[in-house]
Image (cartoon, rainbow, N blue to C red):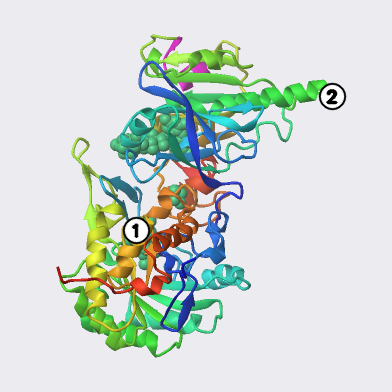
Amino acid sequence: MVAPPKDACSALAELIAIEILPGDGVLITVRPSVELEPLDPNRFFMLRREDGLSPKIPRPFSIYREVAREDGPADLVFMIKVIGDGTRALANTRVGESLRLIGPLGKGWPSFTEPADETPWVFLAGGIGSAPFFMAVEAITAAADEAEASGERAPTPPPFLLYGAGTRELVYDAEAFSELDCALHVATDDGSFGFKGNVVTLLQALQAAGSIPQRVRIAACGPMPMLRAVERFASANDLECYVSLEDLMGCGVGICNGCVVETKPDGPLGAWPNAKCCVEGPAFNTNAVVL
Amino acid sequence: MADLSVRFAGLELKNPLLSASGTFGHGLEMSGFVPPAALGAWVSKTVTLEPRHGNPAPRICETEAGFLNSIGLENRGLADYEATVLASLENTDAVIFTNIGGRTPEEFAEMAARLDGYDQISAFEVNLSCPNVQGGKLPFATDPATAEATIAGVRAVTKKPIFAKLSPNVAFIGEIAKAVEAGGADGITAVNTLLGMSVDWRTRKPGLALVMGGYSGLGIKPVALRCAWNCATSVKIPIIGCGGIFTADDVLEFLVAGCSAVQIGTASFSNPALLGELPALLESRLAEAGLNSIQELIGTLRRES
Ligand SMILES: Cc1cc2nc3c(=O)[nH]c(=O)nc-3n(C[C@H](O)[C@H](O)[C@H](O)COP(=O)(O)OP(=O)(O)OC[C@H]3O[C@@H](n4cnc5c(N)ncnc54)[C@H](O)[C@@H]3O)c2cc1C
Ligand SMILES: Cc1cc2nc3c(=O)[nH]c(=O)nc-3n(C[C@H](O)[C@H](O)[C@H](O)COP(=O)(O)O)c2cc1C
Ligand code: FES
């Protein structure tokens, strides 16, 4: 009986801004009608239009950025890749229209700053899988700033962000990522932007060149073939590794049993063969699940 | 303000709104979205005697006008239900229906007998109609004699109200309704999901791993309404309508067709707070129509032109 997160609510949100990205991406900014607690990176929301133009079942999206405001609840920014009816309907929403917003859901990433650990994080993002890393980098920066202000050491070094995609225009919002306090490296399959290859071959190249140490911790989000490659790399090198999974979801709140993730028989999630991506994830340690 | 309370099968519900099994938790997990006291009754996900791991993924798939699922009754079994869920329900003022599923008539009876002593449970809903187990053969929901015998077996071991949950996947649902009435059911839930499937022709893949699954949501409303009406006109026991209900108007349509209450399933995925928002919407609909009590609407379908 895993309950939905205590801070989750079902509310309306007004579309404040929409920005079409090159390729198939869009950034939408929404203003929730209710005040939400500050969000941890990689919590997610279920979103849909209520005017009959969206499918009835909402779709899950990671929180990409939070924009604080003086006079009310923070605005939420989602980065969406248009692939089907649900995402297309959201991309066609106009400023002023309202959306159903269910969340915040899921557990987000594990803490990247507690307990303090010198081993740097490498974030591996595949295409739209970059969305949950923006706030992750911000959180590490904020913890470092806070430590510095009180004369302490940062709990963890600045992370490395390796951002891969098929081609240049699928490296969504690259400029915003380049302004973050982390070492950003881009890879494209066709070599149109950055390194020619994928994020795993890029990581290997950077390690061989000495730009990234051999001992790192990994968090990855992207298409399943990429996550499988990341898992193989992490287990071959005995590295701690988390993957954020994009399962199909019916409810997002742990009720429908639709978002099954196979658990490892003797893994930390216990003997039950399925975990629920929406309430137990979306991020899992690779020692816990079968990809 | 209009009175939303309804009375049937020895139960007094503060409104005719129930959650549909499998769409609102085993217990009160959804309390953060809907206060337990806001519902007429909470219906649990189907509990089975033994734990069930459920079906392979993909288990869900949305289609043009509805939702396909092939969950396969994933649940931790009766012993866990007693130890965790029922224990958590001890001090609730919510009215709880426990939905039970069995592989044989004896198993249904065994479960009801074991659960009969729990005061937390106000009524049993007997799931005769899950399409996602037993290869979709629906052995309890398609043969009147088996349906009657299964309900009679449960009737013999409990005095709690029993609602038989029927399948729309039959030619004459009224016949099954009569059979469960004869078996001693106090009411009928009409209906469970329709059997459906979807295909992606480009990949040649079915939307669900097991190909067939249960079809619910908007698209099944006319079928569910017709089934509920067939049942209501075939038996004397009360009917709880279910299938494709999303709005206050949908609720009232089922009541006019003869239902004493309704259940809301897939719509809770669109908005998990919906069940808590509907009472106020029902009140305003009734006020607009000048009605004082929602009971006045039940079974008032006018067939003359
Ligand atoms: C926790 C979580 C966070 C997410 N965050 C984001 C985000 O920040 N930005 C973003 O753009 N997307 C994100 N997604 C993915 C997003 O939810 C899906 O792309 C969306 O549901 C697709 O809906 P649709 O109606 O447009 O496509 P559909 O019509 O539902 O699907 C179109 C096609 O894509 C396939 N498909 C759909 N969803 C998936 C999937 N998850 N994996 C593989 N194939 C799929 C379908 O089978 C179908 O063939 C996230 C998913 C999860 C679970
Ligand atoms: C994901 C899902 C799981 C369900 N699980 C059950 C179940 O365990 N037992 C049951 O009797 N009905 C189950 N149902 C059927 C619903 O209770 C309901 O009868 C059906 O979905 C039609 O109503 P709706 O259109 O409002 O969803 C399930 C439906 C869905 C969508
Ligand atoms: S999406 Fe329904 S249980 Fe996870």
- Marks 2, 1: nearer the viewer: 1
Q: Chain of mark 1?
A: B
The Cα atoms of the two marked residues, 2 and 1, are separated by: 60 Å
Kindly check if marks 2 and 1 are in contact, taking CB atoms under 8 A apart as contact: no
Residue A251 horizontal side relative to residue A154, left or right: left
Residue hosting label 2: A150
Q: Is residue B220 above or below residue A79?
A: below
In the image, which residues are magenta? A194-205
Query: What percent of the width, then of the height, locates residue A231?
Result: 49, 33
Query: What percent of the width, then of the height, locates residue A2?
Result: 55, 56
Q: Amino acid at mark 2?
A: Ser
Task: Give the numbered dot on residue A247.
Answer: none
Query: What percent of the width, then of the height, locates residue B160?
Result: 46, 84
Residue placed furthest toward the bottom? B156
* Quadrant location, the N terminus of chain A: bottom right
Disc 1: CA contacts within 10 A as few (<14), some (14-19) or many (>=20): some
Residue A227 makes an appearance in the image: no
Task: Give the numbered dot on residue B249.
Answer: 1
Q: Nearer the viewer, residue B289 or A250?
A: B289
Q: Residue at x 42, y 51 (%)?
A: B269
Q: Chain of mark 2?
A: A
Q: Is residue B209 above or below residue A74?
A: below
Q: Is residue B104 above or below residue A148?
A: below
Q: Nearer the viewer, residue A121 or B150?
A: B150
